[in-house]
Image: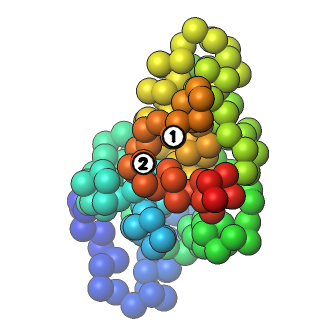
Amino acid sequence: MSPLTPPADGLPPDLIDRLVARAASEGLLDVAYARVDSPLGPLLAARTPRGLATLSYADFRGGVDAVVEDLATRLSPRILEAPGRLDDVRRQLDEYFAGRRDRFDMPLDLVLVAGFRRRVLEATAAIPFGETRSYAEVATAAGNAKAVRAAGTALGHNPIPIVVPCHRVLRSGGALGNYTGGVEKKEALLRIEGVIL
């Protein structure tokens, strides 16, 4: 079975839910994913039993199939579209985009990053809503003040944008800098948070 054509396609929702529950109970589901509509375009959210592992701008990364194939390679081939397993993620994202949530409350699984990159993402996750930091400040918080460029690279490969708010990291002097989903998405997120009026 290919992760790109899950057996649940075209089946009634209750049957899909039973299939997902059965796969999980038998230890056959390592990664559950769901498509998420957002004002910034389509997203793909994926979680492991430990927490949210990916929130991807699907249009930027070659579409849903490309993201799922990458997850099947990097995390596990036991991946299944299981929207019910990501209801809390979709709800919190909807609330965030509607201006009713200023922090996310969900477990994260940073399995796709390690070492300094992981420390950069952990430092970035601590930046409060409506505030920003420079790449230099994030590098310092991650334990290496001289690794500003490496911090930028880590943020450019953030597997969980929005929730791990790499959009809150700016260049010294306040310039926006780059963003995985495109600078217009970074600007839109900062407007939601009141940083850009």
Q: Residue at x 51, y 40 (%)?
A: 176
Q: Which residue is mark 1?
A: 176
Which of the 4 image quarters holds residue 15?
bottom left
List x then y, in percent, for residue 55: 49, 54
**Of callouts 2 and 1, the N-terminal one:** 1
Q: Residue lying furthest top in this view? A: 146
Which class describes the residues within 10 Å of circle 1: few (<14), some (14-19), or many (20+)?
Answer: some
Which of the 4 image quarters holds residue 25?
bottom right
Name which residue type carries label 1: Leu
Drawn side of residue 157 relative to residue 131, left or right: left
Drawn side of residue 13 relative to residue 69, left or right: right
Q: Which residue is mark 2?
A: 183
List x then y, in percent, for residue 117: 53, 25
Name which residue type carries label 2: Val
Where 59 falls versus 22 (above or below)? above
Q: Say which quadrant the C terminus sits in.
A: bottom right
Where 137 falls versus 159 (above or below)? above
Q: CA distance from mark 2 to mark 1?
A: 7 Å
Which of the 4 image quarters holds residue 40?
bottom left
Q: Are marks 2 and 1 in contact (CB under 8 Å)?
A: yes
Q: Residue at x 34, y 86 (%)?
A: 11
Q: Say which quadrant the N terminus sits in.
A: bottom left
Depth check, front residue: 143 or 74: 143
List x then y, in percent, for residue 164: 61, 45
Q: Is residue 164 among the parts visible in the rendering?
A: no
For the image, the number of numbered tags is 2
Which class describes the residues within 10 Å of circle 2: few (<14), some (14-19), or many (20+)?
Answer: some
Q: Residue at x 73, y 72 (%)?
A: 100
